[in-house]
Amino acid sequence: MAMTEHSSVVSPLLTDLYQISMAYAYWKSGKHQEESTFDLFFRKNPFGGEFTLFAGLEDCLKFVQNYKFQTSDIDYLRKALPDYIEKEFYDFLSTLDMNDIRIYAMPEGSVAFPRLPLLRIEGPLLKAQLLETTLLTLVNFASLVATNAARFRTAVEPQKILHEFGLRRAQGPDGGLSASKYCYLGGFDGTSNVLAGKLYGIPIRGTHAHAFVSSYQNLDELKVRELSDRITGESRPFAQLCLKYLDELGSILKIFPDQTSKGELAAFIAYAISFPSGFLALVDTYDVLKSGVPNFLAVALALHECNYEALGLRLDSGDLAYLSLRVRANFVEVAQKFNLSYIEHLNIVASNDINEDTLHSLEKQGHAIDTFGIGTHLVTCQKQPALGCVYKLVELNGKPCIKVSQDIEKVTIPGRKNVYRFYDSNGEALCDLMTTTDESEPIPGTRKLCRHPFYETKRAYVTPTTVQTMYKLYWANGQIQHALPTWQEVRIYAQQQIKTVRKDHRRNLNPTPYKVSVTDHLYLFLHRLWMNSVPIGELA
Amino acid sequence: MAMTEHSSVVSPLLTDLYQISMAYAYWKSGKHQEESTFDLFFRKNPFGGEFTLFAGLEDCLKFVQNYKFQTSDIDYLRKALPDYIEKEFYDFLSTLDMNDIRIYAMPEGSVAFPRLPLLRIEGPLLKAQLLETTLLTLVNFASLVATNAARFRTAVEPQKILHEFGLRRAQGPDGGLSASKYCYLGGFDGTSNVLAGKLYGIPIRGTHAHAFVSSYQNLDELKVRELSDRITGESRPFAQLCLKYLDELGSILKIFPDQTSKGELAAFIAYAISFPSGFLALVDTYDVLKSGVPNFLAVALALHECNYEALGLRLDSGDLAYLSLRVRANFVEVAQKFNLSYIEHLNIVASNDINEDTLHSLEKQGHAIDTFGIGTHLVTCQKQPALGCVYKLVELNGKPCIKVSQDIEKVTIPGRKNVYRFYDSNGEALCDLMTTTDESEPIPGTRKLCRHPFYETKRAYVTPTTVQTMYKLYWANGQIQHALPTWQEVRIYAQQQIKTVRKDHRRNLNPTPYKVSVTDHLYLFLHRLWMNSVPIGELA
């Protein structure tokens, strides 16, 4: 779709047909103005984890703000729907806006847990119903991929750099763009996706591909062979310098200088002449240790002689742990021989089909990688490519609605609810508490009974040091109610939120479930309704 | 992104940064005009299968046609790239178009196999390189989800109807839209996605959700209770008729009419009054057999008395095989009692988290489902959420390029190549043959030696009854060279293509690999280059 500009205008037709069918049936039955509340929530954290990053709110708000059927939309619906649909319904749709809808939500980037409404949508039944599919579409993938990124972030040491390189394997152009945006939210440091850089201010990263190396077969092909000294401006015979250093490296690295690929060396020289302050070379087109690394170091040393410093190299195949350690050892030797300590610390980037498990395994066995470039597994969320957010009616005309199910996890918690997060004195989250909206706010320092929503005996008193009110009213009276934070601010908030989650909830293997509880009042309210909704069975 | 209109303008910034870095390095090194050929292909069919549907071509062509850096793009690049980049490069970029690029491709909807170039891109090195990421993004997901849809299609009997219901779980708005579009190509009959209906002319389908049923608690809430007879126009007491039939159904279905949910019945009545010719009810909000089906049939019989015919019902939970058979048995009884044979054949729609394996299992155990509504697993391709298409330089300045690898599957086949598909007298595909572009076309009825590209002894003579030339020149001289087929025509071609693939290649379990072969000439060419590219090892 049109991606030339940062336009988040999502059509109201980006929805399931049944929403429009139901809208007509509500309208035709005189029910469309009934006051409703819907909760948007998920039932299970993704990836076998115990936390989720909530994302997609800004897109939801912009969708609601711009909600408007275009003339061509109405024309299409007239053709697509049965011809007995009353004409007045189309007039009604064509002037429809979301100005009497209210949206309460957690701030974007909040940590969220199962059954907590991420969004609470209030207003006329027809309108709240019409929002369902699109809000789900905007929240589901955003939250999923942000959570995935946060898990990758957790899998490596904090000082490691993570770049998202997934555009080419993403689920469509917008899948790629959303992935870049929400991976940054989840803790990635940059992306290869240039458009994401332009639209969201995300740092963009990348150097060259194998094709660049393959495009040179030998040194004769180099048309430009000189480089100007960074300080003196003097023109230096750069290609010749590289060959001189390659020769010197033979005995240091114990390789045969005449056996490194001269096509590869030519490519590195051309690249360094183009990016003398940004030289980062892909070294695995031929043989990493016998060709790529010696060629790279030769160019790095020649750059040094011209008063530039190379940045590092990238590994895109092979055993990344082993190779990175061997490469670092080469760096150390060269740093010592030439008395250039920064060479020892050149950036080693790795980028070969890395997933979350690879990261854990690398951290365990030891490696010398500084930066990870991660694509397919990250952006398509290979471990679980969909989050199962649902959108459920919880109140209509002031009366609570409950959806019962034989599967206890699928019972919805009825009525309009607030959520509070309790923190201990270290700023770590203790548990979340859901209340009905007519209950008073929990008070910091005061003991509060927190009950499991379904299991009678599971309950505990909790005394929070601080209490976070999770919802804000984001949309009312046809306006976004808060100046939305910048994308950088959202990212900082998300990273702070993740730190409030205890490590045992965040760990990869068998994490401890975080407690989402209800007040005694909400517990009793829920269970009374539940009992009344399930008829007593009759054994024939 | 802007989805209000059918606009396929994908920004040239929707690419990896390294493409732009390489472009600069090619430009700076005077290599940008070198004549190159790239192949876009995959190495492995997805989902453990042995065929792939090629899709995304139209999007690729429109991307190339509209390729243009906007002023704001150039401004962004100036800020994002190092400040020593020569200013003339930005002038060069700002006037760049793809008019001297040539794209050969298989028609969209062709069946494709590993190693066959789906697209062959020819032209100046810098330009062909700049297209890499975006072409991959446009082909990878389109082909993946079309193939997934084709596999679901193969899993059920041909007369079954398949609808795509995946928008809410898709990977972003555009992920959802692409999925709807390419599932239709793969053999689905309709989508719930209204925007996909508008943009691509795909039939849209859907009725109502659980929320609609939950929005009624009892019959008193019905504000409209009458329905006009379709033929006479006479107003009939519709709600009362429904109750009368519900009462009659008690003994026929062996249920207690007073124990069906009256909220559900009210919702069905309201829906039927709104859609009297389109009544399809979701029957599992309470109890399918004790409440949903009796309520549905009561309304269906009342509709009949008003000269309308109900369409059917939808199951969204439980054991779909068992329930559908029980429902069909109910239909049969009611059809007989009321002498209304069409009731027996009412449409049973099923839609509960269905994946490819569920379909195979349902077909095996027997069921009475007519229509499947399929979402998450289909659109996110849960079994394998990414296709691994790559883009490799195969020729530069008239010289073949080969990418060698220790993994034989990763060796690329060098040079500019054509592909021919051989068919037998039944119209079934026998094998594909790759040739260099300077070889003559294979002649139908003439014996041809077909060799495995890598294994010396694997070879066979094949005499095709017909030969399909797989590539057409789609883009040259700045113009799309063929009037593109409509989306309906592409779908018909894709379905024909799938039928040419033998069933043993298409089956779910251990399918037979399809043979992709090369001519003797190409075999020798490839192996000579390969030998020359791999230096003789040296054991220290």
Image (spheres, coloured by chain):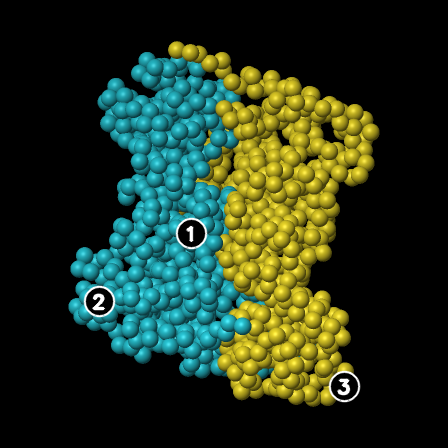
Chain colours: A cyan, B yellow
Residues flagged by tags 2 and 1 on a common chain: yes
Q: Chain of mark 2?
A: A
Q: Is residue A69 above or below residue B498?
A: below
- The quadrant of the image that shows the C terminus of chain B is top left
Task: Say if residue A175 shows up in the picture.
Answer: yes
Give the residue displayed 29% in from the left and 64% down from the top. A458
Q: Chain of mark 3?
A: B
Label 3 crowding class (10 Å Cα cut-off): few <14, some 14-19, many 20+?
few
Q: Comparing marks 3 and 1, which lies closer to the viewer?
A: 3
Q: Is residue B15 above or below residue A279?
A: below
- Determine which quarter of the picture holds residue B327: bottom right
Three-letter residue code for mark 2: Tyr
Distance CA(mark 2)–CA(mark 1): 35 Å
Residue B89: percent from left, percent from top = 48, 39
Q: Is residue B392 left or right of residue B459?
A: left
Q: Name the element at disc 3.
A: loop
Q: Is residue B401 left or right of residue A75?
A: left
Label 1 crowding class (10 Å Cα cut-off): few <14, some 14-19, many 20+?
many
Q: Are marks 2 and 3 in contact (CB under 8 Å)?
A: no
Q: Chain of mark 1?
A: A
Residues flagged by tags 3 and 1 on a common chain: no
Q: Comparing marks 2 and 3, which lies closer to the viewer?
A: 2
Three-letter residue code for mark 3: Thr
Q: Which residue is mark 1?
A: A145
Q: Which residue is mark 3?
A: B232
Distance CA(mark 2)–CA(mark 3): 68 Å
Q: Which residue is mark 2?
A: A461
